[in-house]
Amino acid sequence: MKNVAFDWNDLKFFLAVARHGGLSAAGLALGTSASTVSRHIVALEERFGASLFLRQQTGYLLTDDGAALLKHIELVEQAMMAAERNGRSSAQQELSGQVRLATTEMLAFHLIVPQLHRFRTRYPKLQIELNIALTRANLSRREADLALRIVAPDPDDGAGDYIASRVGKMDFGMYGAAGSLPADANVAAWQTLNYVSWDDSWADLPMAKWMKTTFRDKPPALACNSLQAQYAAVRSGLGVGMLPCFIGDGDPAIQRLGGIQPSLSRDLWLVYHRDLKGSQRVIAMRDFIVELINERL
C-alpha cells in the first residue's frame, strides 16, 4: 500500500463496511446511501493504491491489505474517542445562547434537522434558530448568523463582508417512482413520461434549464417553486423529476433513471459574516455542518 495521510471522514466509511460486511448495511449505520459509501470506498482504495475488499455476492470481505489497515484504524479510533470524551465536556457544555442558520428546505429537511439532536447533545445550552426560505438571508442585516447555500455569495449581496467556504458538492439525478421504468432505461424512454419541474420564476436555475432542454417543448405535469413538493410528486408517481442523489438514492419508494452518473452537480457553500469569525457558537455550527456533509454527500 502507498504511504498516505489518513482522512478520518473517509476512514469512517471503511470501518462501517468492514464491520457490517456490505454497502447497504454500512450506509444504514451511517445514515447515508449505499452508492455514497461505495464512492468513498473506491476513492480510498485509489488513494492507498490497493484493494481493501473482495466484492462477493454475499458481501464485502477484507483483503490482507484491508485487514492490516483495519488494525491500525481501530487503534486510531480508540485514541480519538478517548480524547473526545476527555476533552469535550468543559468547552462544549459552556457554550450558550442562540445560533441562527439559514438554508434551503431540502437541506433542512433531509440533511440538518434529522441530525440536530447530535448538535444539542454536544451543546445542550445552545438554542438553534433555523431560517428556511427560498430567498437568501441577508447576513449583513443579521437575518442569520451563517448560511448553507447551493449558490456562491453574490457581490451585490455584501459578499465582500462574508467568509465563504466551498464545503461539498451535491449531485442531482433523474428519479421516478419505483417500478415506473427499468433502472437502466435510457433518456428517450423516460422522456415520454410526465415530469415535474420548477416554475417560471426559477427558470434560471441549472436544474430547471436542464429539464427544459431535456423535455424540449413538453410542459411539466407540475411546476412549482418547492423542491420538497417536487420530491413528494415524484414519490407519488405524478412524474419523473430531478432530485438530490443523497435523498433519492436512500429512498426505496423511488429509483434513479438513466444510469448512475448524476445529471449535474452544485457546490455547497457555507457563508458567515466576517464579524462572527471568532464566534464559538458559529464555529460549532459550522464544524457540525461540515461533519454532516462529509458523512452524507
Image (cartoon, helix red, strand yellow):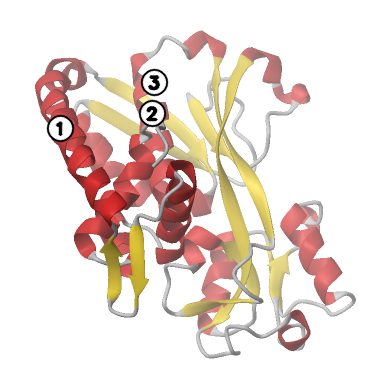
- Kindly identify the residue that appears in the image at 30 percent across and 54 percent down: 30
Marks 3 and 2: CB-CB under 8 Å?
yes
Disc 2 target residue: 287
Q: CA distance from mark 3 to mark 1?
A: 21 Å
Could you say where residue 104 lies in the image, as x and y percent from the top left? Answer: 54, 46
Name the foreground residue: 83 vs 245.
83
Could you say where residue 40 lies in the image, as x and y percent from the top left? Answer: 44, 51
Mark closer to the observer (3, 1)? 1
Type of amino acid at the residue the image marks with label 3: Ile
Is 162 placed left or right of 34 in the picture? right
Q: Classify mark 3: residues with Cα within 10 Å, few (<14), some (14-19) or many (20+).
A: some
Query: What label sits on residue 81 in the rendered view?
Result: 1
Q: Classify mark 2: residues with Cα within 10 Å, few (<14), some (14-19) or many (20+).
A: few
Type of amino acid at the residue the image marks with label 1: Met
Name the foreground residue: 69 vs 104.
69
Could you say where residue 249 lies in the image, as x and y percent from the top left? Answer: 48, 68
Q: Is residue 288 above or below residue 132?
A: above
Q: CA distance from mark 3 to mark 2?
A: 6 Å
Kindly indicate the quadrant of the structure image that contains residue 83: top left
Kindly indicate the quadrant of the structure image that contains residue 279: top left
Q: Is residue 297 visible?
A: no
Type of amino acid at the residue the image marks with label 2: Asp
Is 164 placed left or right of 209 in the picture? left
Q: Is residue 141 above or below residue 172?
A: above
